[in-house]
Image: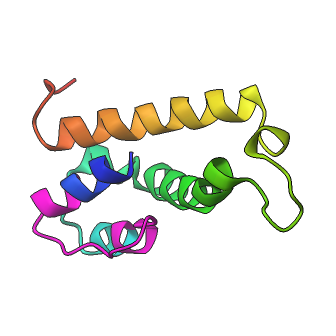
Amino acid sequence: MELSLKAALRFLAVEYPREHNVRDVLLEVANSRMLPEWFMAEVEFVAAVSSDLAMKRGPAFYGDEQALRPPSSIFTQTDASSALKDAGKVYENCKRLLGLTPQV
């Protein structure tokens, strides 16, 4: 999902941050009106998913090291399903923006 968003930003000739969360750059691009109208309707969702999954990335890999809790004690199957669904929607939006899927 992160790489899909970074590919979309590169496609738009926008420099993205060298970090996992690209939320702020997406919102700046939205404010500049560089995005198609259909993507503008999705940008709040896409930005929120970017921020949410970036925040959860470390704990999903390493758990809570200070509390000695593995990722499996922090996240549930429901969390994983939700993350996968949201990431899939972001990916599909990015594919469409790049012209890799037909317009709907």
Q: Quadrant of residue 17?
A: bottom left
Residue plotted at (40% across, 47% down): 42
* Residue 96 shows in the view: yes
In the image, is 8 to the left or to the right of 65? left
Where is residue 71 drawn, in percent x and y?
74, 45
- Image: 62 above or below 104: below
- Image: 103 above or below 22: above
Residue plotted at (78% across, 33% down): 76
Where is residue 94 drawn, in percent x and y?
26, 43
Residue placed furthest toward the right:
67
Residue plotted at (28% across, 47% down): 4
For the residue pair 20 and 60, the one nearer the viewer reads as 60
Q: Quadrant of residue 13?
A: bottom left
- 13 within the magenta span: yes
For the residue pair 13 and 62, the one nearer the viewer reads as 62
- 62 within the magenta span: no
Residue plotted at (52% across, 37% down): 86
Where is residue 50 drawn, in percent x and y?
48, 56
In the image, is 20 to the left or to the right of 31? right
* Residue 35 shows in the view: no
- Image: 84 above or below 36: above
In the image, is 4 to the left or to the right of 45? left
For the residue pair 61 and 1, the one nearer the viewer reads as 61
- Image: 67 above or below 25: above
Disc tally is 0
Q: Quadrant of the N terminus?
A: top left
Which stretch did the figure color magenta?
Answer: 8-26
